[in-house]
Image (tube, rainbow, N blue to C red):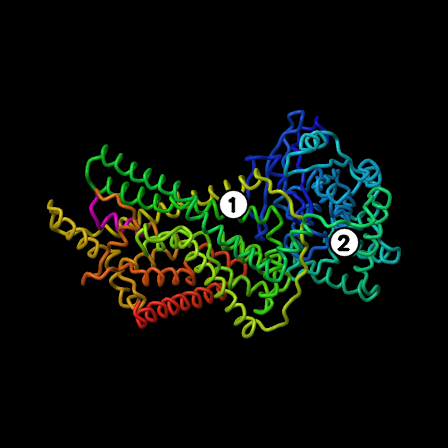
Amino acid sequence: MNEGASKELVIAIVGNPNCGKSTIFNALTGLKQKVANYPGVTVEKKEGYCFSQHGKRMRLLDLPGAYSLNARSPDEAVVRDVLLGRRADTPRPDAVVFVADASNLERNLYLATQVFELGLPSLLVLNMMDVAEAKQWRLDVEKLSARLGVPIVPMQATAGKGLTELKAAMSRKLVASTQVAPPIPGEIRMALREICADLVKAGAVHDAASLLEPLYLVSDHDPEHYGIENAHLARIDQASTDLEKLFPGWEDELAAARYALIEDLLKDTLRRPERDEATLTDKLDNVLLHPLWGGVCFVAVMVLVFYMIFSVAEGPMDAIDQLTAWLGHLVEAHMPDGDLRDLIVNGVITGVGGIVKFLPQILILFCFIGLMEDTGYMARVAFIMDKLMGRVGLNGRSFVPFFSSYACAVPGIMATRTIASPKDRLITILITPLASCSARLPVYSLMIPAMFPSSEVSALNKALIMLAMYALGTGGAFFFAWLFHKTMAKGQTSLMVLEMPTYKMPALRHIALFMLERAKLFLRRAGTVILGLSILLWAANTYPKLDKPEPTEAAAKAAYQSTQLSHSIAGRMGHFIEPIIKPLGFDWKIGIGLVSSFAAREVFVSTMSIIYAVDGDKEDTAPLREKLHDDKWPDGRPIFTPLVCISLMVFYVFAMQCLSTVAVVKRETNGWKWPLFQIFYMTGTAYLASLIVYQGGRFIGL
């Protein structure tokens, strides 16, 4: 790379999934990165900046993980199109840093050789050298570098080893490899020349001298032909059909030739013991992939997660509660009484603070998800769930986006793009919102303590109740997957092909950045959507006001505030829908929360915070859960009984209360048919399930 050039260098970081690519990207860029989506697709676009040893700023693109440039998924199509310079929204890279798993070289070099053939200046990073050494592999790095024609940097990214050497190599001038020739048999090469000339004439290919671009075009069989203009689809499809007629199985022949090339590259450069000893990964998989103990370990991990959510997060949550109360008292001490002060204290501070307090629990959830992904355990979870998913018409690959939705359904739905079968992808999209996402966590965390006085239930019991809610959502998702598979989306269950990554120590810096990124998204949501809704809810709870003035006596004051709340816009709306929701055990105040939380589930908590701040003694700083526990029906019966709390949680398990999810489903399915169906079936199921729980509980005397 020429340091004298004024042009900003664009470097793509490329590699297979689970090779440590994102860990290296995070180590190079730190906080100097941004995440978005590539226009037109929901593939994540990550960019960042770092500086060379000479102070030159370099723009880094962390491309999605891929196995081949012969795209079979949107992720691989984006990698292909960026490297070929076919995306108008992303510049073609000036150089490539290819990250390979040193303990799985044959598989990783398949994509690496394809990338090196593109003629871009390249650098090969051999990550996870510690894993290769633990397997007693001996690699002659210099000889392999000479054979590939690119410099090689050995690394152990999780420990930061090799990072300085990588920065130094990136600061030097890189060159394109001339050692790796495309393994294309002569007859196919001649056919590709003719295809190339035809595609250039049609404007589908820009580089007439390259056989590689038409090769990756005509072998593109993904149904939506990502990255290819519609005008060229018929011509490209015809070229692919003609090639298959002339040379049946030509793609398999090329793949075999490429693996033969890789075998030749590694023949004298990689030495392995004649008899492989059992590695730590093998020993762990004997337990974690066991038909019985694997499932037991997975359930134990989930119990641990929820136990940590209630035990470890309790202190920080109490601190945020105290901070919220202190801010409210501070405003009251320095502002005159009036609507503006009431808006700030009971609208903004109470509404937003009621949501922000759950940030510690959400961070713990994201921490565990990050750990499971970084250590390689997430792939094992997909394997464990494959047999169960097969019973409902899906496979373990569908469980990965579903499991991701325990954090948030939006990226979970986006992750369904990795599912090749359109049938499986649609079913997975339809059931993914049933995973209990982090937005439901505040509702569960509010209702579970409200069921009992805090002294009567331990953190473990709370964790088990929460686990039951998550299990209910998962069971519901499996039921509907089975139902949809049997009815509207009939077809054979697709097979799962899944690579099991080697277990590795998690990169704590990578996980910390992941948690920080999610915390920023959560706080941004709290500071925008929830802030705006909190202000609107406060206004709806406050206006129109009663004509008579507020009394000063405590008892009369409390009665006045309750009457005022009933008289407000929100109160009238709640009373209007109360006959519909009363069979579920819900009163009109809960009804306000249900309606307002359609935008986002966690808004229910801020709604309750605002309602019980407006309808109560302004000096009462008791936690919201205690206020709920003390609330009564007009006849003196408690409203938030354990049965009502369970009924409400069951409603939120199944209800589609998230506009962001509706929007992304609409975008992913290209229309309103499936999101509207999703709203209908989930809301109907939520009402029916809640009705059965409440009325069934009353029938047996609960």
Q: Secondary structure at mark 1?
A: helix
Above-or-below relation of 582 to 362: below
**Residue in front for this viewpoint, 253 or 467:** 467
Is residue 63 something that shows in the picture?
yes
At x 27% / y 61%, what residue is drawn? 587
Label 2, label 1: how many angstroms apart (C-alpha)?
Answer: 43 Å
- First in sequence: mark 2 or mark 1? 2
Q: Mark 1 = which residue?
A: 367
Give residue 214's mark.
Answer: 2
Above-or-below relation of 281 to 496: above
Residue 81 on image: x %, y %: 68, 49
Which picture quadrant has residue 73?
A: bottom right
Above-or-below relation of 215 to 389: above
| 614 within the magenta span | yes
Majority secondary structure of the magenta segment? Answer: helix
Residue 321 on image: x %, y %: 33, 42
Quadrant of the drawing holding the N terminus: top right
Instruction: Classify mark 1: residues with Cα within 10 Å, few (<14), some (14-19) or many (20+).
Output: some
Above-or-below relation of 438 to 691: above
Question: What residue type is disc 1 on?
Answer: Cys
Residue 141 on image: x %, y %: 80, 37
In the image, 312: left or right of 218? left
At x 55% / y 43%, what residue is drawn? 35
In the image, 397: left or right of 214? left
Is residue 422 something that shows in the picture?
no
**Residue in front for this viewpoint, 148 or 248:** 148
Instruction: Classify mark 2: residues with Cα within 10 Å, few (<14), some (14-19) or many (20+).
Output: many
**Residue in front for this viewpoint, 422 or 441:** 441
**Residue in front for this viewpoint, 209 or 560:** 560
